[in-house]
Amino acid sequence: MSEACLKTDFNPPIDHRLPRKSPYVATADEALANYQANEERTWYKSSADPDDLAGKYAFQRLRHTWFTPKIDPKFKLRRDDKFYAIGSCFARGLESALIKHKMAVESAAPEFAKLQPANKELSGLGFTNKYNTYSILNELRWVLDADAVFPVNSIVPLTKTTWYDPHTTPMLDFVSREETLERRALLQMVTERIKRCRAVIVTLGLAEVWRDIHADVYLNCTPIPSLFKTELGRYEFHLTSFAQNLANLEAIHALLTEYGHPDFHIVVTVSPVPLMNTFSTMDIVVANTWAKSLLRAVAQEWASTHANVDYFPSYEIVQSSDRAAAWERDLRHVRGAGAQHIMELFLRKYLE
């Protein structure tokens, strides 16, 4: 990989024109028909028993240990489809569940088995996590678009013998520059397999993003702390906007339309896993609510624009289930039973 082959990062154009057309418009008759057909349309009724777990009202259904929302998929996926999951750490859980059901998951490639995490309790696959819409778009552009070249100058030295690729997740031991680039080549080789996948799962995680000013590229996650001392003034922090994230997702759709499977379908989700830290001035709980709300709204807007993009409410399932059952003690990681409930619902609804 030559350092001469460098290009600045692509920043999707942002359309600031307002107002935009409403994503869904119905006549009065159509809206009333929606109301009549939707048995899960009402939150509360004063005469209903709140403890009736067979009830249809939200205030009854939310008393179940595991919340099960009404889901009407736009499309169906097939058991013989090839799947590709890209996005935050929640995507790795989806991969595992699909593999257990004997599905072909191209993103969990056997080549990754040689990646040994620094923390032996974790999976080396975490190395592939993509936490924001910029890093998802970048990874796809670098393998699908011949005019987009990976910015080698964004890889930086940590010591005299170790280097860091800020477009991956630091789950592995830091190694030489040569081996760091070998890992990068492996990741790009596997990412290219998305071209043969009819089923693509995109999981959105973060709206707080870091940018490398020198290389003019947005990063996957927060730079290693030591770099703030050794690379003074190199990195800047961004709270991204709705328009920026939507533009990134539209660019992803355009890439897959041009280079992907001729009949690709995208299921977009929002990871329920909250922020670990915030670099804004907000309380972490407030920052997390802002980020997840923004990404949730962006996902809905994206899905409403394309017939082959659908939103799956994994975020709402976890947030609306019993907290003690859903979360580990850190209130950050979803318990195995919760992930199982989500995947069983996904498979039941989306697979033919």
Image (tube, helix red, strand yellow):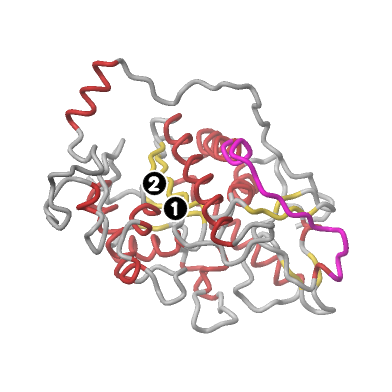
Q: How many marks?
A: 2
Asked which quadrant contains residue 258, the reply is top right
At horizontal 18% and vertical 42% (from top left) the residue drawn is 45
At horizontal 61% and vertical 48% (from top left) the residue drawn is 143
Quadrant housing the C terminus = top left
Q: Label 1, label 2: how many angstroms apart (C-alpha)?
A: 6 Å
Q: Callout 2, which amino acid? A: Ala
| Residue 3 in the image, given as x and y percentages of width and height | 82, 55
Question: Is the C-beta separation of discs 1 and 2 under 8 Å?
Answer: yes
For residue 199, the mark is 2
For residue 84, the mark is 1
Left-right relation of 327 to 228:
left
| Residue 41 in the image, given as x and y percentages of width and height | 24, 37
Q: Which residues are magenta?
A: 229-246
Q: Secondary structure at mark 1?
A: strand
Q: Callout 1, which amino acid? A: Tyr
Left-right relation of 312 to 61:
right
Asked which quadrant contains residue 130, the reply is bottom right
Magenta span includes 330: no
For residue 116, the mark is none
